[in-house]
Image (cartoon, rainbow, N blue to C red):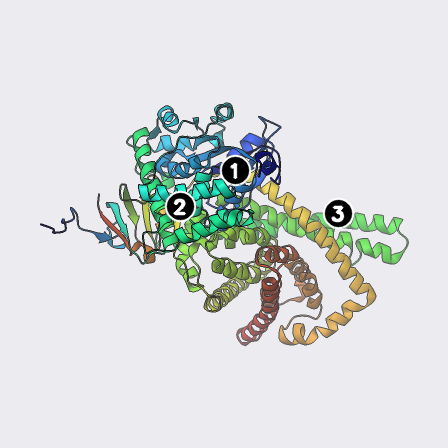
């Protein structure tokens, strides 16, 4: 295969640069600085799980990639594999390794592998301000000389070093290898390298680097070899070489020797001066994971979020917008206008009737949901940037052990409170397919998205605090019990938690607002069409006489078993499209609901089917069969729990 | 004489190390999953480097070159350390 012919096989022929590095070192902030394109940026490892692409400001002829963080290469988790796929399949011309300046040893550990890929590189030592604050100074000139590549100190959040980094790209160079492995490893590497060169050379990546990754059992390199016409002999040789041989495996020996080389170089170029042993950030960070004080802090955080979202957002703002503005001013004016201009009654009803596109669809989306999700996304953004979510994984670890997971799964679940669809994608940060399957199932069943959460808090908060507590307790119990069952049914074993705790930081208002704006835009783009489609369906069902029939047919379940008014059947029909749409339907019935009915209705609708977008994401990530199976379990579970709760609560209240 | 040289320091389990103590990682037990051993290496836990034990409950938390790592007891139990 000729070199030119190989290059033409890239999916995107544009010359590509990529930001590569450990999780949570600031790649996405740098991406934003270099391209002007905003991707979600947070203070916890695993924010980026897919590759983002944009054209950088400094060169409109190239494409810049923001890749998911890699703890180490060879790749192991799904997000690491996404990065490896980009390295293998993109027209990769320059790598910008983004490293944590205060932890050079770890940065160089990754450099030791990237250097073997034969792609020109630049090393950006980011978070230099945090390194300085901790008394760490790096001799970048000596480091650049040792690695034979440009090294630039940056502070991406403050824009420091961006010009120098852009200039350095013109001098990107293939780095000098950090080490020679021991003789036995080198002979194996050379053997595989020769086979790759003979049978399936990569158009851009060095055969030696691919050999090291292959011996390290990188699944993506294996998949790439499998796709090459001449890859079979290489795979056979790798299979023979990498067969498990006791404890000291070849991947472990490769990793250990890279680590030793990185350690030696880091020692040479790093100076550690005295630094403050206790800062406020450290103190807050310790309290957050303290065995005793961590819990009051968590309850305090939850209470503040409740006050901001449930009280201020769902009560005050919704009251102002829905009742005062939409109910008192806007909707009467629009109803008058429509009736004044449209003489056909059914057509007027289509816009401003009981199931009107404006009076139901747009009013729910803008007056009810928008204030709730806005306050939620603001609170969420603050917590994300503070670094608290990673610490939550420590506190929640023991509880998650009950459901066969470790505390790492708390991240997608908390993100699910924002939007379950995106959180389903974030499960890629989990290390095993078992963890992903259980987490996705639990999110589809029992994690309400922000809009639904807001509607629930708005309705139940208005009734009594007890109602809210019963709803929370019911959902947590269902989550724990079904999780425990799932952990017994899904084969595999639980993986203990090992995680990095990023420093607690003061959230940057600009980033929080930017994130909130981006999320609201995405949310409205998804919600408004679905709410309008849902309203149209309800209108059609009502006009055709099907809705009264559904309400009648649903009576034994909805009235008899759940103890709700017959009209609640309509809310469940709406819930098939989006759970928050269904919750809004129950919210509209609030004057007809007593405390038990409100709790039962909200618990059932919370556990009810995941929204269509989430379902599509589950199909994408787990396949149609798994998604269908989840759905088949979730719907009966929701109604079963709702009924049990109805009959149980009636005994008490 | 072929006697095994006596270790310079006693080896203890990371889980039993007092809070505030500086230690060096000597070995990872076979009980730790190979992928998690790789993970520990990648986080920078290696024999040559001293780490500080910040807390032991609910998880073992270490300070390893300005980065805090939380390690569940099931793993920390099989990490052997010696005083730095």
Q: Earlier in the sequence, mark 1 or mark 2?
A: 1
Q: CA distance from mark 3 to mark 1?
A: 44 Å
Give the percent coordinates (x, y) of residue A577. Answer: 68, 59
Q: CA distance from mark 1 to mark 2?
A: 18 Å
Give the number of the disc on residue A28.
Answer: 1
Q: Earlier in the sequence, mark 3 or mark 1?
A: 1
Q: CA distance from mark 3 to mark 2?
A: 50 Å
Residue to which mark 3 is pinned: A329
Question: Could you tell me which secondary element the residue under label 1 belongs to?
Answer: helix
In the image, A520 versus A429, the foreground residue is: A429
Residue A387 appears in view: no
Task: Please identify, in this view, whether the residue under mark 3 or under mark 1 is nearer the observer.
Answer: 1
On the same chain, marks 3 and 1? The answer is yes
Binning the other alpha carbons within 10 Å of mark 1 as few (below 14), some (14 to 19) or many (20 upward) gives many
Query: Badges 1 and 2: C-beta atoms under 8 Å apart?
Result: no
On the same chain, marks 3 and 2? The answer is yes
Residue A95 appears in view: yes
Query: Badges 3 and 2: C-beta atoms under 8 Å apart?
Result: no
Residue to which mark 2 is pinned: A501
Chain of the residue displaying label 3: A
Using residue A579 as the reference point, say whether residue A480 is left or right of it. Answer: left
On the same chain, marks 1 and 2? The answer is yes
Using residue A190 as the reference point, say whether residue A268 is left or right of it. Answer: left
Which residue is painted at 24% across and 51% down in the image? B17
């Amino acid at each position: 295969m000729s070199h030119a012919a190989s290059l033409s096989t890239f999916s995107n022929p544009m010359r590509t640069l990529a930001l590569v590095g450990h999780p949570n070192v600031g790649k996405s902030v740098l991406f934003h600085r270099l391209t002007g394109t905003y991707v979600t940026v947070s203070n916890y490892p695993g924010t980026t799980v897919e590759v983002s692409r944009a054209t950088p400001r400094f060169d409109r002829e190239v494409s810049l990639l923001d890749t998911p963080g890699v703890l180490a290469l060879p790749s192991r988790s799904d997000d690491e594999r996404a990065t490896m796929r980009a390295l293998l399949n993109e027209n990769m011309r320059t790598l910008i390794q983004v490293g944590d300046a205060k932890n050079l040893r770890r940065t160089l550990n990754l450099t030791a592998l990237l250097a073997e890929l034969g792609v020109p590189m630049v090393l950006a030592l980011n978070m230099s301000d945090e390194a300085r604050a901790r008394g760490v100074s790096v001799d970048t000139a000596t480091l650049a000389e040792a690695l034979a590549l440009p090294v630039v100190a940056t502070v991406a959040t403050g824009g420091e070093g961006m010009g120098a980094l852009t200039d350095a790209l013109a001098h990107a160079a293939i780095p000098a290898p950090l080490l020679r492995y021991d003789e036995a490893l080198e002979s194996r590497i050379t053997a595989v390298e020769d086979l790759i060169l003979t049978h399936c050379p990569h158009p851009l990546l060095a055969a030696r680097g691919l050999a090291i990754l292959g011996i390290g059992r990188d699944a993506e390199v294996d998949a790439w070899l499998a796709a090459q016409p001449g890859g079979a002999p290489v795979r056979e040789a790798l299979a023979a070489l990498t067969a498990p041989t006791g404890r000291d495996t070849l991947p472990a020996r490769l990793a250990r020797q890279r680590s030793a080389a990185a350690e030696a170089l880091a020692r040479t170029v790093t100076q550690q001066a005295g630094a403050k042993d206790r800062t406020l950030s450290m103190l807050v960070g310790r309290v957050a994971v303290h065995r005793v004080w961590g819990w009051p802090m968590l309850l305090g955080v939850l209470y503040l979020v409740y006050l901001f979202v449930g009280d201020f957002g769902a009560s005050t703002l919704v009251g102002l917008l829905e009742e005062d503005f939409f109910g008192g001013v806007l909707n009467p004016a629009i109803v008058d206008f429509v009736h004044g201009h449209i003489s056909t009654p059914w057509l007027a009803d289509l816009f401003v009737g009981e199931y009107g596109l404006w009076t139901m669809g747009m009013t729910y989306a803008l007056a009810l949901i928008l204030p709730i999700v806005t306050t939620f996304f603001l609170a969420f953004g603050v917590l994300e940037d503070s670094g608290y979510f990673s610490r939550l994984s420590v506190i929640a670890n023991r509880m998650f052990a009950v459901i066969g997971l470790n505390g790492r799964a708390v991240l997608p679940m908390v993100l699910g409170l924002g939007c379950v669809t995106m959180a389903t994608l974030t499960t890629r940060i989990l290390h095993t397919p078992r963890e992903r399957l259980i987490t996705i199932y639990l999110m589809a069943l029992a994690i309400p998205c922000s809009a639904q959460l807001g509607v629930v808090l708005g309705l139940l908060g208005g009734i009594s605090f007890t109602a809210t507590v019963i709803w929370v307790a019911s959902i947590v119990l269902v989550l724990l019990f079904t999780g425990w069952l799932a952990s017994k049914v899904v084969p595999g074993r639980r993986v203990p938690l090992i995680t990095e705790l990023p420093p607690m930081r003061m959230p940057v208002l600009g980033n929080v607002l930017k994130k909130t704006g981006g999320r609201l835009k995405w949310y409205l783009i998804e919600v408004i069409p679905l709410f309008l489609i849902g309203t149209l369906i309800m209108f059609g069902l009502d006009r055709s006489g099907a809705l009264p029939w559904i309400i009648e047919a649903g009576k034994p379940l909805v009235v008899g078993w759940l103890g709700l008014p017959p009209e609640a059947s309509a809310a469940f029909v709406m819930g098939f499209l989006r759970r928050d749409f269904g919750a809004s339907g129950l919210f509209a019935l609030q004057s007809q609901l007593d405390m038990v009915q409100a709790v039962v209705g909200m618990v059932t609708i919370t556990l009810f089917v995941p929204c269509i977008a989430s379902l599509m994401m589950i199909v994408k990530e787990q396949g149609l069969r798994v998604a269908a199976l989840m759905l088949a379990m979730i719907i009966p579970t929701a109604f079963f729990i709702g009924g049990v709760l109805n009959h149980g609560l009636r005994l008490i209240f | 004489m072929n006697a095994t040289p006596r270790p310079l320091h006693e080896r203890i389990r990371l889980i039993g190390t007092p809070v505030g103590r500086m230690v060096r990682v000597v070995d990872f037990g076979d009980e730790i999953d190979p992928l998690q051993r790789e993970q520990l290496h990648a986080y920078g836990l290696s024999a040559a480097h001293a780490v500080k034990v910040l807390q032991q409950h609910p998880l073992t938390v270490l300070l390893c070159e300005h980065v805090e790592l939380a390690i569940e007891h099931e793993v920390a139990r099989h990490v052997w350390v010696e005083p730095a």
